[in-house]
Image: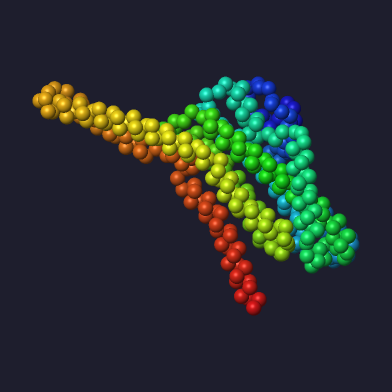
Amino acid sequence: MDAGVAIAQVEAAPRAEFARPYAPSVIDRLIYRIDRLPGHGWWFYPALIGVFIAWIHGWLWATGVRPVGTFEPAALTYVFYPAFALAAIHFLDRAGNAAMAAFRPALDLSDAEIERRRYELLTLPAGRTVWLVFAVGILIGIAVVGTQAPDSLALFGRTMTESLIVMLPFGIAGYTGFAALIWHTIRQLRGVAALHREARLNLYDAGPIYAFSGLTMRTGLVWITVGYYSLTVSGAFVTVNPVALPLSIANFVFAAACFVLPLYGLHGRLVIEKNRLLHEASQRVTAMTTELYERVDGRQLTGVKEVSDALAGVVSTREQVMKLPTWPWPPRAIGQFVTALVLPIVIFVVTQLVGQQIRH
């Protein structure tokens, strides 16, 4: 099988043949190879962080910036981001694959068309866009590293040149990875919204309705993790950097948008469908009520029990329709996500305030 086929195409279950609309990006090709490692390659990402930490400390020890054998906590500021961005794309591709399987019953499409939609949901296209994304990440990485405070630079070298040799490659790699993750996130969640527009809605079948809520929640949590890590572990560097700080705060706004916006359009369609079902149920309630009154008023008591039972049935049906969901998130999901979004921010603000009081 071609190494560029998306994660969904390497699952054990056979897939229908389809014509790929575009070639996969270099990112997808890399993740494909990682996913084929034992355990889907999840061990690769912490191992990569370990290699990065070892490389930085080898440099610090060799240049005499730090005594041999000592650990520099500031190294964690930069080594996390490149590995996490790649792992997040891998993770969200697998989550998207599972969501697509749950959503399948809502799509009146052939197997080949389904596989095409799956491919588009999970695969970034090769071409100029990916290189443009990388270029943006490189520029941001250079801007962030170039605006670091002198005290921060001194942690990695005796001169600015020595510091940049250590910091610049990781700054570029980290922000390039996150530029790719932003592109992946926007493209994937736009795909979710497009699939919802194609769907045949059945309010009695909540599986497809909730299918992509897990993906949007996981996507939001990915960006919450990035923001929280930036403001805590990397806080000494981020909070004093005029480029990195706004980007870190924007992670939380982006996380909320990832959770809400891709599914909000489906909410509107569900409301319309529920209103249609309620209208039909109410018409039947009105018809059976009229029938019952006519029989009673005309003393035509034969069949009244059947009409009364039918009326009770349609009333019960209308009550069931009124309980059908119109929000494409399971119960408690919104509360859980809001807690995950707000709690880290509250903890960070409180710790900063406490720290200021202690220093004063």
The quarter in which the N terminus is drawn is: top right
Residue 315, image x, y percentages: 28, 34
Instruction: Decide if residue 53 is in sight here.
Output: no
Residue 350 in view, yes or no: yes
Answer left or right for 194 relative to 172.
left
Task: Name the residue located 78 percent from the left edge and 50 percent from the top edge.
Answer: 139
Q: In front: 326, or 44?
A: 326
Numbered circles on residues, count: 0
- Give the x, y percent position of residue 148: 78, 62
Residue 251 to residue 158: above or below: above
Place of residue 239 in the rendered image (x, y in percent of width and height, measured from the top left): 69, 63
Residue 175 position, x and y percent, is: 74, 50
For the C terminus, give its image quadrant: bottom right
Residue displayed at 63% across by 73% down: 356
User: Residue visible at 56% across and 62% down?
Assistant: 346
- The colour scheme used to paint the residues is rainbow
- 192 left or right of 69 in image: left
Q: Is residue 58 left or right of residue 330?
A: right
Q: Residue furthest left?
A: 299
Which residue is farthest bottom? 360
Determine which quarter of the picture holds residue 23: top right
Along the viewing direction, whichever of 119 and 280 lies nearer the viewer: 280
User: Would residue 191 appear left or right of 324 to someone viewing this image?
Assistant: right
Q: Residue at x 37, y 39 (%)?
A: 323
- Residue 3 lies in quadrant: top right
The vertical placement of 308 against 216, above or below, is above
